[in-house]
Image (tube, rainbow, N blue to C red):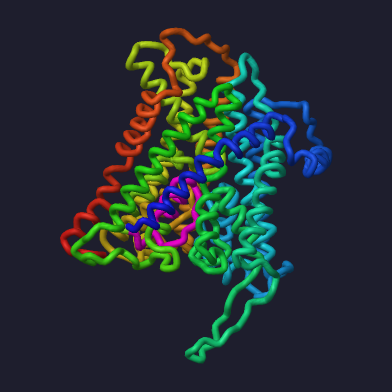
C-alpha cells in the first residue's frame, strides 16, 4: 500500500464521522416534527400527500396497525413492479424494444427491490426498459429505504415512550423520510454525478465502431437519478450490469469516493438521530463506535489479505477482477462498505477477491447487516443485538436486564431471537439444498470450495437484504430466482415484524429510574461486550459453513491450489 492509499482511507472515515452529526441532527428535526430548512420547500407536498391518501397527522397507531399498513404498502409495490415487468413490451420508454421479463425473474426482481435487497439476476441494459427502471425500480429504491427508516422510528418511540401503545403513523414516517431526507439528497447527488459524467438521458442505445472495425452497442439512459438513490438508500441495484464498475455509473475517482461515502452516510447519521430521540447522544455514539470498530476491523483484514504474498501470484497484487481505474484499495473499501451497509453495489467483482477478503464481505452479510447496515434496518438490527447483550449481561450479574429504563423480559428476548435466527436459517438451509442438488450446482462457475462460497454468498446476500453477489453464479434460473426471492422475504419481514412487536411491547412499559446497579450501555465496556456478542452469534452460527468455503480455499491457495 502507498501513502496515497492511506490518505484515501483516512479521508473516507473523516468525512463519514464528520457528516454523521450534521445529517443526524437534521433527521432528528424532521422525524420529531420540528422546524427545518426543507420544510418550506416540500411542506406543501407533505400536506398534499396526507390529504390525498386520507391520513390524519394527529392520529397514531399501535404496533399491529403499523405493521399491517407497512405490509400492505409493500405488497402493492411488489405487485406493481411484478406486473410492469411482465408487460414491459407494451409500456412506454422502451427504445431498445426489450421483451417481457420471465415470470420467475420478474418475481425475484419485484421481491428484491421491495425488500431493499436489489439482488439482480439479470443484466439491466439488456433486460429492463427505462420505464421499468424508473417507475418500478427507482421508486422502490425510495420507498423501501423509507420503510426501513419508518420501522426504526417506531422502535425508537417504543423505547422512549412509556405506558402507551402508540408508535406513530407509518404513512407519516414514510412520507417524511422520502420527502425531506431521501429525495433532496438524491436530487443533489444526481446533479453532482451528472457533473462527473454519469449518463442521464432518454436516448436510444448508441452504436459505435471499434478500432477492430466491429460495431458495438453502447447502452445509455436515465442512470444518474437511479445511482443516486441506489447508494443513499443502501439499495445497490445497478442501472448497468457491471454496476458501479461501469464508467457510465462511476466515471471518476471523485464519483467513486462520493458513492462509497453515500453508501454509509444515512445509516451512520441515523445513530446520531437515535441518540437524540432517546434523549442521550452518548447512546448513539456508542452504537456508532461499535459499528465503526467492526467496519475498520473488516477493512484491515481485507486489505491485508489482498496485498499479501501467496504461492499463486507471488509478489503480484491481486488485480484480477479489480477496478483498474481506482486500484485495489478503493475496490476493497467498497467491498467492505457495501457488504457492511446492506448495499449490493460493487465496483469490483467479489468473485475475484482473495478468499479471506471474500469471507470478510460474507461475514458482514451473515452478522445481520448491522455494521451500519441498511437505511434504518441496520440500526434496528443492532438494537436486536443490544437487547441480547443486556439480557446476557443481566444473567451474568444476577440483575433484571434493562435498556434505557425499560426492562427486557422474555417476550423481547424471544422476538430478538426470531429476528436473529430467521435469516440465518435461510442462509444455511438453502445453501445446503443448493449444494447437494443438480439444479443448484448447475449454475456454478467454479468447483470446490470457491463454488461453495458462490452459493453461500448468494443466500447470505439474499437473507441479509444486501444484493451483492460473487458474480460467478448464474442465478437467473427458476430455482435460484424462487429460493433467493423467498430468502429476501424472510430476511426482511422475518426481522421487521419481531422488531415492531418489541417496539409495541416496550412502549407499554414504565421507565425504571437509574440506580447504582443499572448496567450502563453507553461506555467502552458495553461496546466491547456488544461486539463480542455479535461475533459469537455470527461465529457459532456460520463458522462450519465458512470452513467449507473461504477458509479451506485460503489454506489450499497457500498450498498452490486454486479453483
**Residue 435 position by quadrant:** bottom left
Q: Residue at x 39, y 28 (%)?
A: 527
Up/down of 32 relative to 16, above or below: above
Q: Residue furthest front?
A: 3
Is 106 left or right of 361, judged from the image as shown? right
Q: Nearer the viewer, residue 25 or 238?
A: 25
Q: Looking at this view, is 310 or 380 the one in front?
A: 310
235 left or right of 167?
left
Q: Position of residue 370 (x, y in %)?
A: 46, 39
Residue 538 can be seen in this image: yes
| Horizontal relation, residue 298 to residue 92: left or right | left
336 in the magenta segment: yes
The image position of residue 295, as x and y in percent, is 40, 43
Q: What residue do we see at 68% from left, 32% from top?
A: 29
Q: Position of residue 397 (x, y in %)?
A: 34, 13
Identify the magenta region. 332-353
Residue 398 in the image: above or below residue 77 = above
Q: Is residue 390 above or below residue 369?
A: above
Looking at the figure, which quarter contains the C terminus? bottom left
The reply to whether residue 459 is in sight is no
Q: Position of residue 211 (x, y in %)?
A: 49, 88
Q: Is residue 467 magenta?
A: no
Residue visible at 36% across and 52% down?
456
Q: Nearer the viewer, residue 258 or 181?
A: 258
Task: Please tell me in which quadrant of the rendered image residue 58 appears.
Answer: top right
Amino acid at each position: 500500500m502507498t501513502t496515497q492509499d492511506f490518505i484515501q482511507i483516512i479521508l473516507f472515515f473523516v468525512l463519514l464521522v464528520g457528516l454523521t452529526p450534521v445529517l443526524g441532527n437534521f433527521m432528528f428535526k424532521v422525524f420529531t416534527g420540528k422546524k427545518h430548512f426543507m420544510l418550506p420547500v416540500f411542506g406543501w407536498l407533505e400536506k398534499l400527500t396526507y390529504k390525498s391518501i386520507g391520513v390524519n397527522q394527529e392520529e397514531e397507531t399501535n404496533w399491529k396497525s403499523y405493521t399491517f399498513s407497512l405490509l400492505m404498502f409493500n405488497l402493492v409495490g411488489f405487485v406493481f413492479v411484478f406486473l410492469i415487468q411482465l408487460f414491459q413490451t407494451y409500456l412506454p420508454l422502451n427504445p431498445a424494444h426489450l421483451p417481457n421479463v420471465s415470470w420467475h425473474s420478474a418475481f425475484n426482481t419485484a421481491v428484491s427491490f421491495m425488500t431493499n435487497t436489489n439482488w439482480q439476476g439479470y443484466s439491466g441494459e439488456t433486460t429492463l426498459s427505462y420505464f421499468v427502471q424508473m417507475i418500478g425500480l427507482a421508486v422502490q429504491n425510495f420507498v423501501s429505504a423509507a420503510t426501513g427508516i419508518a420501522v426504526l422510528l417506531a422502535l425508537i418511540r417504543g423505547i422512549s415512550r412509556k405506558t402507551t401503545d402508540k408508535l406513530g403513523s407509518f404513512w407519516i414516517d414514510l412520507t417524511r423520510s422520502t420527502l425531506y431526507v431521501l429525495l433532496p439528497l438524491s436530487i443533489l447527488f444526481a446533479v453532482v454525478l451528472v457533473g462527473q459524467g454519469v449518463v442521464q438521458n432518454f436516448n436510444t442505445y448508441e452504436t459505435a465502431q471499434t478500432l477492430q472495425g466491429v460495431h458495438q452497442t453502447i447502452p445509455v439512459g436515465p442512470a444518474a437519478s437511479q445511482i443516486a438513490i441506489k447508494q443513499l438508500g443502501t439499495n445497490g441495484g445497478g442501472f448497468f450490469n457491471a454496476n458501479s464498475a461501469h464508467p457510465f455509473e462511476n466515471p471518476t475517482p471523485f464519483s467513486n469516493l462520493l458513492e462509497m461515502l453515500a453508501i454509509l452516510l444515512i445509516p451512520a447519521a441515523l445513530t446520531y438521530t437515535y441518540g437524540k430521540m432517546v434523549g442521550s447522544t452518548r447512546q448513539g455514539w456508542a452504537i456508532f463506535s461499535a459499528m465503526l470498530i467492526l467496519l475498520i476491523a473488516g477493512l484491515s483484514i481485507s486489505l491485508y489479505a489482498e496485498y499479501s504474498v501467496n504461492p499463486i501470484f507471488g509478489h503480484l497484487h491481486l488485480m484480477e477482477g479489480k477496478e483498474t481505474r481506482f486500484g485495489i484499495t478503493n475496490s476493497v473499501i467498497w467491498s467492505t462498505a457495501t457488504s457492511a451497509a446492506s448495499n449490493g453495489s460493487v465496483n469490483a467483482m467479489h468473485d475475484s477477491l482473495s478468499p479471506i477478503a471474500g469471507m470478510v464481505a460474507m461475514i458482514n452479510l451473515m452478522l445481520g447487516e448491522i455494521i451500519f447496515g441498511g437505511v434504518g434496518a441496520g440500526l434496528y438490527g443492532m438494537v436486536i443485538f443490544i437487547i441480547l447483550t443486556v439480557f446476557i449481561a443481566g444473567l451474568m450479574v444476577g440483575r433484571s436486564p434493562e435498556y434505557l429504563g425499560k426492562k427486557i423480559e422474555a417476550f423481547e428476548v424471544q422476538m430478538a431471537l426470531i429476528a436473529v435466527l430467521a435469516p440465518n436459517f435461510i442462509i444455511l438451509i438453502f445453501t445446503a439444498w443448493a449444494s447437494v442438488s443438480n439444479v443448484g450446482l448447475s449454475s456454478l462457475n467454479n468447483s470446490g470450495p470457491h463454488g461453495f462460497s458462490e452459493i453461500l454468498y448468494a443466500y447470505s446476500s439474499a437473507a441479509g437484504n444486501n444484493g451483492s453477489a460473487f458474480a460467478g453464479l448464474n442465478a437467473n434460473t427458476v430455482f435460484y430466482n424462487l429460493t433467493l426471492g423467498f430468502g429476501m422475504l424472510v430476511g426482511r419481514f422475518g426481522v421487521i415484524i419481531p422488531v415492531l412487536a418489541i417496539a409495541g411491547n416496550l412502549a407499554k412499559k414504565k421507565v425504571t429510574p437509574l440506580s447504582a446497579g443499572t448496567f450502563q450501555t453507553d461506555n467502552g465496556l458495553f461496546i466491547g461486550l456488544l461486539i463480542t456478542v455479535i461475533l459469537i452469534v455470527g461465529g457459532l452460527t456460520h463458522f462450519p459453513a465458512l470452513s467449507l468455503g473461504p477458509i479451506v480455499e485460503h489454506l489450499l491457495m497457500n498450498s498452490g491450489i486454486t479453483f
